[in-house]
Image: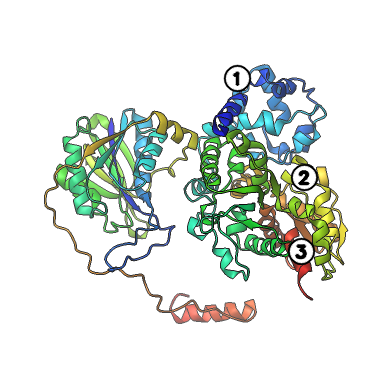
Amino acid sequence: MHFLVVFRMVPDVVEELEVAPGGKSLETEYLRMIASESDDHALEEALLLKERHGGSVTVVAADAPELDDALFSALAKGADRVVKITGAEFGLSTSRMAGIVAATIRHTPGLLPADLILTGTQAIDDLDGLIAPLLGFHLGLPSLGIVTSVECQPACGAAVVTREFPDGVRGQFEIPLPAVLGVQAAEKPPRYVPVAKVRAAMKSGRIEEVPAPEPAVAPSLEIVRMSKPVPLSHAEMLEGDPEMAAAELCKMLAGRGLL
Amino acid sequence: MSASLGAFEAALEPTLETLTHSPEGRKVLTCMQCGVCAGTCPYGDVMEYPPRRIIGMLRAGVLEKVFTSDSLLNCVACYSCLAKCPRNIRLTEVLLPLVKEQVFLRLPEVPAELHRALQNILRYGNPFGEPPRKRTAWLKTLEIPVRILAEDPRPVDVLWFVECENSYHPRGQDVSRATVRLFRALNVDFAILGNEEKCAGECARLLGETGLFDTLTDYNMAIFTKYRFDRLVTSGTHAYDAFKYHYPSSGFRYPVEHTMTFLAGLLDRLKPLLTRRLNYTVAYHDSCCLGRHNGFYEEPRRLLQAIPGIRLVEMVHNRVNAICCGGGGGGMWMDTYYKAKGYERLSDRRVREAAASGADVLAISCPYELARFEDSLKVLGLDGKMVVRDINELLAESMEVS
């Protein structure tokens, strides 16, 4: 089976984000980019599926700072091929990215046919979780998000997919292959890759570069203003000995209907 | 030229295949299977393959079995087997790192806490996952300005390599502030790398994550070449070992000292400044790196005894017999793993002993111990009965005007 994984580089929130002068973008001086956390889960799920069913895993991503590190790390973890889309502007909106990635997948030799296209269900700059459905739309494939496990049934050309719903409810869906999945969490936490393997991948591995296809004009949103959240109130400290504080806390919780 | 020399030296370091052809490796074969190593190992009782058996497996040609066991995840690199071996086999330096590297490469799953710490070290240069930009945040609460080489690159005598714990951990930051006061009082010409500094990487190496160690070595060596300094003094005991024993094979050519031994060397000038009486009963915990690995047993005690009022007592296990705090060799990030396995936390064992010694201050000189022992005091309900202080904190306190 052939699994495609779509990576997206997002701002690393360990470095405190600042709004740039002008108020419409992030200050880039200290900005670092990191592979979106749920994309790491998508890769892990793809690697688990490859271990189970055989086949290959290809990672595709639009160029961004520090993307090479993420791609070499994917190779070290067991991806067979990594493709970098170059030349698109930095800071793509989700809809532009979906268009560019989908066109790249269509036009780059060897990427299709793929049995499953996996990506993170959300990213910190795509909280609506639009990337998987948009990829599905552009490629004419069914898509499903918030996925927590995938059971491929290659013989009948389908996969049984577990999807999470609010309130701890889970649903199982049968989805025909090929399909696009937005992965929320892999069945196991993403694996650790020893740095020696990453260093080896940097020496002997190859990142394929393909130029970004001419993007179709996609509807996109305009950023009007970015600002840091302003705390409206502060935590209240309960003073006094533990028993008094506990009693006070119980009273407050009961007053709010929580006890 | 130094870089090529470094590569030459690195090529001489034995691999598992060439081990028994090297002098140190041949020595491993002289093992008489007495088992002192396994007996002295703090986690020897829970290892499927304690050090003695690992040597036996090597000799029997079935070492591979050790690679797929998690035995060596329990090695906290305390140097006890090395220090006690009647044949002077330097296990922690010759055989164990090579075996650990293989164990680490084959681990089916890296324990979650360790996974996070190693990823953080790689990406942010510290195990906490704190921003590199905040490495010098502790300077803001210090009344004395500290020179950062990136801002003022003039040559300097002492490059002080602060290391992670003493840059980020709130208690470690207390130690750093005390260290600055001591350096200032002694007119030490010093500077720090500031936010350019990254973890020296020794614990990654001790754990078997040698790729991470190599990456950090490459990074720190590139930073060192930007500046001119005469010697390096570090607050990290593991960093001390890294710079003393392993960075040289990458071309590092500076004299290295730990802050504790550095201050001990300046004791004649320091002593007249220690005017404030501290009426404490102090037990000193010998750290594994400074003690067993490097033999600095008397220096810390001399420093403590120079403080007026201090009464020094010894724990049952001291000097070469000191019990490891459990933080070395990656143990710092495996408490949850050990706990899940039901092992005793070594720092709890040590703190119980410290309390039994009658001391009210447990003095330390390794940054890991501060956090570990303070946690153990709380876990054991001894909080308030005893405090943990770095020697530098006690020295700085004794310098204060009473």
The reply to whether dot 3 and dot 1 touch (C-beta < 8 Å) is: no
Which kind of residue does numbered mark 1 sit on?
Glu
Q: How far apart are labels 1 and 2 at the CA level?
A: 31 Å
Amino acid found under the numbered disc labelled 3: Leu
The quadrant holding residue A87 is top left
Q: In which quadrant will I find the C terminus of chain B?
A: bottom right
Picture quarter containing residue A124? bottom left
In this figure, which residue is indicated by the disc labeled 3? B394
The amino acid sitting under disc 2 is: Gly
Residue carrying label 1: B17
Q: How is the image coloured?
A: rainbow
Q: Position of residue B131 (x, y in %)?
A: 48, 57
Upstream in sequence: badge 1 or badge 2: 1
- Let me know if residue B39 appears in the view: yes
- Which chain is indicated by disc 1? B
Residue found 58% across the figure and 41% down from its top: B204
User: Which residue carries the number 2 mark?
Assistant: B291
